[in-house]
């Protein structure tokens, strides 16, 4: 469900008045997952006002630059720097708990002047995929698990990150996976996080300590893909703000510290019949259905081609290495955490697939869109999966791209994904990521200075 299910414009206005809101943060998630937009006084905020921002806001790299001399990009985003019209989604209205004055935040959809959705906006891409399911009478159900690191404040990007100091006055120096005491080291922070999430109506669930030093994980209750993408978008903002309040950083980098495991965004996914609510991954007698096999087949066939979205930065591929918590291939198996697609042991109606490949650094809207797109293509094309893997899948060969340039080339070449995700989205996204990689290649790393300076 959305944060405020079935809210109308009138309901949103009433909620703002009841909560004596004086200021509103009008948010647009960009392709990197960053919150863009404007802050308005309450008196200036109306749907009829038609707030506008340039469409190029959705065409920036994470460093804030724009591709130049790229024909595909220029066909999608006007060179005249025209505006998009923003419209608030009433169901996403919520408080900003860390603000001093009564402040609300609300996510906006982006429209062209003719009233159509901006097709390369992340929310629009996910809506496009969900409509494909709806047209078939299906409804995806997802349940994300998000990992992240808490670190000491780090104001010099040339210095490595360190685990933060907890209540004991000491930082972690050993692996504390599933340790309750290690989580309790940061009780004041997590109490704020849970309080903030309750005030925002974010339906968070289980908190655990992951394998890395200062690495935590949080589960969300399963539900609608768009609503949960909104929740993840809000949660990332919330966690960063809460960490800063406690003199720490919270990071969703896929691989923030050398020698420590990377952070993932595992997405559990199933598909129900929209009319009956029945899980279509089951037959009448409760055994796995052909739909179940085909969904896995689609994930296997198309995931390598969407890795540029599931692993969107150069840093993302430092996580995809053998013999760590991250998968390196597209194998599948039952209760096997070494594969890319794990089938958890569950009741029949809870039969689902867990995509373990997606990084914590992925845009939640786009990550949901592409994993569901892969499954959708498997369903409609009736793709069969490979035989189930029962052993350690890290012993298998790499089946995923090992760098951003290779991943971008696979995405560009896959016409079926262009049809499902949208031609202009793929053009804009690949142009942005290509520029980001070019920018990265201008930086000389400490490893190069250490090992090449005096030895080559």
Image (cartoon, helix red, strand yellow):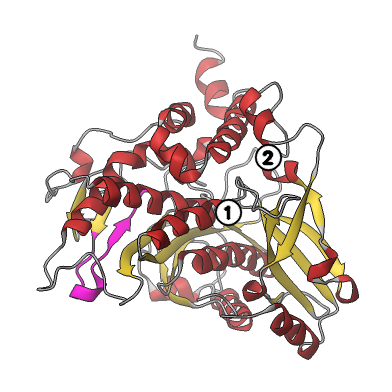
- Which residue of the protein is positioned furthest toward the bottom in this rendering? 18
Q: Position of residue 227 (x, y in %)?
A: 52, 69
Q: CA distance from mark 1 to mark 2?
A: 14 Å
From the viewer's perspective, tell me whether residue 284 is left or right of residue 36. Answer: left
Q: Nearer the viewer, residue 235 or 6?
A: 6
424 in relation to 136, above or below: above
Pinpoint residue 447: horizontal percent, then vertical percent. Answer: 52, 27
Q: Is residue 311 above or below residue 205?
A: above
Q: Secondary structure at mark 1?
A: helix
Q: Name the residue: 51% across, 39% down.
A: 315
Q: Quadrant of residue 387?
A: top left
Name the residue rendered at 64%, 53% in the picture: 117
- Verify whether residue 40 appears in magenta: no
Q: Which mark is residue 135?
A: none
Judge by depth and name the residue closer to the eye, 24 or 184: 24
Range shown magenta: 343-361
For mark 1, does the 10 Å Cα neighbourhood hold few (<14), some (14 to 19), or many (20 or more) residues?
A: many
Residue 51 placement, left or right of 15: right
Q: Specify whether 259 is left or right of 63.
A: left
Residue 109 visible from this viewpoint: yes
Query: Residue, x 40% and y 72% (percent of image)?
Result: 222
- Measured as percent of width and height from the top left, residue 123 is found at 58, 56
Which residue is label 2 attached to?
59
Is 352 contained in the magenta span? yes
Asked where in the image residue 212 lies, by quadrant, the reply is bottom left
Q: Is residue 325 visible?
A: no
Q: Which is in the foreground here, disc 1 or disc 2?
A: 1
As rendered, which of 216 and 398 lies closer to the eye? 398
| Mark found first going from the N terminus, 1 or 2 | 2
The residue at which mark 1 appears reads as: 124
Q: Residues within 10 Å of mark 2 (few under 14, many from 20)?
A: many
Q: Main secondary structure of the magenta part?
A: loop
């Amino acid at each position: 469900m959305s944060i405020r299910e079935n809210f109308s414009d009138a309901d949103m206005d009433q909620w703002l008045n009841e909560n004596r809101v004086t200021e509103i943060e009008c948010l647009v998630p960009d392709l990197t997952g960053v919150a863009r937009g404007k802050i308005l006084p309450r008196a200036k905020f109306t749907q009829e006002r038609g707030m506008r921002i340039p469409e190029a806001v959705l065409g920036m790299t994470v460093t804030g630059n724009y591709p130049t001399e790229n024909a595909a990009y220029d066909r999608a985003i006007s060179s005249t720097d025209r505006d998009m019209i923003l419209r608030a989604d009433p169901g996403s209205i919520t408080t900003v708990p860390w603000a001093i004055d009564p402040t609300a935040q609300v996510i906006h959809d982006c429209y062209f002047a003719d009233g159509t959705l901006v097709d390369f906006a992340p929310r629009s891409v996910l809506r496009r995929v969900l409509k494909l399911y709806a047209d078939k009478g299906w409804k995806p159900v997802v349940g994300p698990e998000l990992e992240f690191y808490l670190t000491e404040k780090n104001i010099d990007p040339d210095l490595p990150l360190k685990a933060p100091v907890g209540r004991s006055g000491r930082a972690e120096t050993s692996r504390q996976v599933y340790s309750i005491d290690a989580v309790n080291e940061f009780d004041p922070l997590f109490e704020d996080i849970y309080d903030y999430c309750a005030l925002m109506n974010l339906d968070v669930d289980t908190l655990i300590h992951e394998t890395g030093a200062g690495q935590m994980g949080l589960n969300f209750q399963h539900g609608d893909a768009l609503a949960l993408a909104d929740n993840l978008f809000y949660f990332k903002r919330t966690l960063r703000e809460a960490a800063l309040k406690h003199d720490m950083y919270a990071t969703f980098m896929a691989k923030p510290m050398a020698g420590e495991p990377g952070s993932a965004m595992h997405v559990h996914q199933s598909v129900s019949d929209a009319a009956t609510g029945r899980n279509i991954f089951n037959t009448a007698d409760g055994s796995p259905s052909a739909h179940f096999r085909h969904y896995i087949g689609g994930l296997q066939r198309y995931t390598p081609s969407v890795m540029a979205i599931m692993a969107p930065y150069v840093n993302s591929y430092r996580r995809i290495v053998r013999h760590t918590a991250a998968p390196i291939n597209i194998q599948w198996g039952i209760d096997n955490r070494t594969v890319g697609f794990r089938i958890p042991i569950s009741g029949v109606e809870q039969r689902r697939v867990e995509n373990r490949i997606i990084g914590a650094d992925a845009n939640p809207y786009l990550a949901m869109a592409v994993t569901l797109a892969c499954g959708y293509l498997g369903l409609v094309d009736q793709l069969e999966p490979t035989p189930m893997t029962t052993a350690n899948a890290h012993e298998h060969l790499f089946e995923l791209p090992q760098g951003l340039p290779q991943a971008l080339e696979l995405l560009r070449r896959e016409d079926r994904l262009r049809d499902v995700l949208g031609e202009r989205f793929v053009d804009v996204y690949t142009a942005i990521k290509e520029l980001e990689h070019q920018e990265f290649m201008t930086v000389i790393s400490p490893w190069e200075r250490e090992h090449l300076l005096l030895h080559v």
